[in-house]
Amino acid sequence: MKSALELAMEKANEVVGGEAGIKLSDEQKAAIDEVRKTYEAKWAEQEIALKAELEKAAGADPQALAEAQAQVQAQMNKVRDQLFAERDAKLEAIRSQ
């Protein structure tokens, strides 16, 4: 599932021209697709692991559960931002080849 920020960025890229305005070779397109798939898989893996941590805390008292939810959400945001920043850097490197 994409965040609102990701959806907005995709729309902005479409309006500005995005990848359509840049001529990419077939190898570059394949590399971009591979990087995207890899990082989507990495994010899904991390998301599952973090949600498992949250489920462990589900039996705790309500205050502890709320704290665990806040911590897991903050950690998810941090991990997602790091993964997507890495992905974007790799995509930019491929496009500039």
Image (cartoon, rainbow, N blue to C red):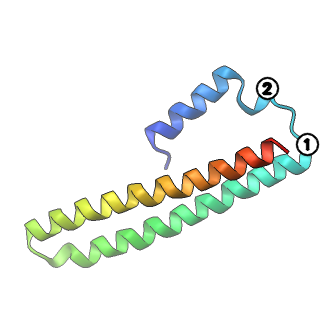
Query: Where is 16 relative to 55, above or below?
Result: above
- Which mark, by number, is residue 21? 2
Q: Is residue 12 left or right of residue 63?
A: right
Q: What residue sits 13% from the left and 76% below the top?
A: 60
Q: Is residue 47 left or right of residue 89?
A: left
Using the numbered discs, state the Cα–Cα distance from disc 2 to disc 1 in whole angstroms.
Answer: 13 Å
Q: Position of residue 42 (x, y in %)?
A: 57, 65
Q: Nearer the viewer, residue 77 or 2?
A: 77
Q: Residues within 10 Å of mark 1 (few under 14, many from 20)?
A: few
Q: In the rendered view of the protein, which quadrant contains the C terminus?
A: top right
Q: What residue sits 75% from the left and 52% below the top?
A: 33
Q: Position of residue 38 (x, y in %)?
A: 66, 62
| Contact (Cβ within 8 Å) of mark 2 with mark 1 | no
On the image, which quarter does residue 9 sit in? top right
Disc 2 residue type?
Gly
Mark 1, residue position: 25
Q: Position of residue 17 (x, y in %)?
A: 72, 24
Q: What residue sits 64% from the left and 20% below the top?
A: 15
Q: Position of residue 21 (x, y in %)?
A: 79, 26
Query: Where is 3 relative to 56, above or below?
Result: above
Query: Where is 6 relative to 54, above or below?
Result: above
Q: Nearer the viewer, residue 90 or 39?
A: 90
Q: What residue sits 83% from the left and 52% below the top?
A: 30
On the image, which quarter does residue 86 sit in? bottom right
Q: Residues within 10 Å of mark 2 (few under 14, many from 20)?
A: few
